[in-house]
Image (spheres, grey):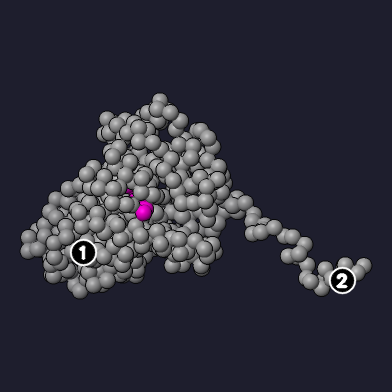
Amino acid sequence: MTSILIRGGTLVDGTGSPARAGEDVLLRDGRVAALGAAAGAGADAATEIVDATGRTVMPGLIDAHTHLTFGEPTGNDELFHHRTEAYSSMLSAYNARKVLRAGVTSVLDADCLWNIGVELRDAIESGIVEGPRMRAGGQALMTMLGGTAGRMIADEGRTGYATVVTGRDVMVNEIRRQIKYGVDWIKIMVTGLIPSMKGPEVKVWNIDELRTVCDTAHELNTKVVAHCRNSDSTRDAARAGVDLIYHASYVDDEALEAVVEAGSALCPTFTLLGNLADYGAKIGTAPELLDVFRAEIEVTAKQLAKAHAAGVPFLAGSETGFAVTPVGEWHARELEMFVEYMGMTPMEAIVAATRNGAFAMRAEGELGTLEVGRIADVLVVDGDPLADVRVLQDRERIVEVIKDGRRIDLVTPIPERKQRASDQVRFLAACPLTRSLALTEDDLERLSHV
Ligand SMILES: [Zn+2]
């Protein structure tokens, strides 16, 4: 019987209803036990008191798009070819703590290296690893054209986070296999970058194949999430019955109509693109790509604002897990992107990252709001996210993280990770070293007279 009374804070309960000043919250045995006057009355001598005067009390954040097993790779080469299963597992466990400390108490980790996401979820639930509550997928289903790693992905079988499914029987069997080993979601990569075509990504599944995936997964009570970085992939994914669509880049009106009609949820995941567009120059991103990424956000957000107005549920996802989106750093940036690019109010952005996220966790009505009976995942924030949602990105301002009714240690330092040498191959040259590049005009001139 553990209980915590969070006293005197301003409650933003995650339902979208207005903030309530001076609303006490009593947590008991991992659940919200009482609110307001009843909370104070329900406390006893053993109740721990958290003073939240002048602070905001809100549900823990739910990041609906993470890759916690990827270990922050700088590129596909590192991710697909220089990792081992055992080291990746340990690295994932190390990183999981950082997620919690950022105020993210739940994540959907839709695809993973090997089956580590599922195992990490279980290790966290068993109490042997500290981390957020997880829902996990296995390796992402691809056609042999899928994803953004081109020919690094073999024509069949498993490579990195991908499993290439050739034909209906292979798809059906792979889904059943993943469910056997414990996935909560099936992830499919509906678009891919085709090496011989100059970007952007194109749809690499036909709708019958997508229907096969959705029908097989749904029959086994498993949901489907799809990476769709163009419009016709978004349209077909919605029509085939995909439950949650990532990106939905460049959606046109026809695709939006399909999403509204099908009742799919959307998780645009602007953060990774936003980090590249805004800060790519600091990390060596090709300069010509920066404007491309910004345009993708702007064009997509303008269309998605219509879907939001039409009542399509939006979830916040950050694509945390790459070098561009290191673990624990950027999860809450998606709320800022929603406000800035889609015109959401801060309250709407908070609802996307709390109540709506419960859909990704397959825990609607259990998680994501601070109402009596709900799971006690709570943040105390030194600041007002309704005035500026960016305060949620500042870990100094997240003064209390409570998961399952237990306070998380935010103080003990996490040792710094050093890069393992064998994670990367040595980089020798960014371009060919021709003689004209190497030698000066004078050298060449002198040599011509020898
Ligand atoms: Zn992703």
Question: Where in the figure is residue 329, as x and y percent of width and height?
Answer: 40, 62
Q: Secondary structure at mark 1?
A: helix
**Which residue type carries mark 1?**
Met
Q: How crowded is the residue under tag 2: few (<14 C-alpha within 10 Å), some, or many (20+)?
A: few
Label 1, on which residue? 347
Relative to 283, 342 lies left or right: left
Q: Residue sitting at 13 percent across and 70 percent down? A: 21
- Circle 2 — which element? helix
Q: Which residues fall within the magenta stretch?
A: 245-250
Q: Quadrant of residue 242?
A: top left
Residue pointed to by mark 2: 446
- Considering depth in this image, is 72 or 7 the residue closer to the camera? 72
The residue shown at (62%, 51%) is 425
Residue 246 lies in magenta, yes or no? yes
Q: Residue at x 69, y 58 (%)?
A: 432
In the image, residue 177 lies in the stretch drawn in magenta = no
Percent coordinates x, y for residue 148 in the rendering: 48, 47
- Residue 265, which numbered label? none
What is the spatial separation of the Cα atoms under label 2 and label 1, in whole angstroms?
71 Å
Q: Residue placed farthest to the right in the image?
A: 450
Instruction: Decide if residue 159 is in sight here.
Output: yes
Q: Relative to 96, does residue 144 appear above or below in the rendering? A: above
Name the kind of residue labelled 2 in the image. Answer: Arg
Rendering quarter of residue 268: bottom left
Q: Can you say whether 167 is above or below 79 in the image?
A: above
Quarter the C terminus occupies: bottom right
Label located before the other in sequence (2 or 1): 1
Residue 3 point in image, percent of width and height: 18, 56
- Asked if ligand 1 lies within 8 A of label 2, the reply is no
Mark 1 burial class by Cα count in 10 Å: few <14, some 14-19, many 20+ = many
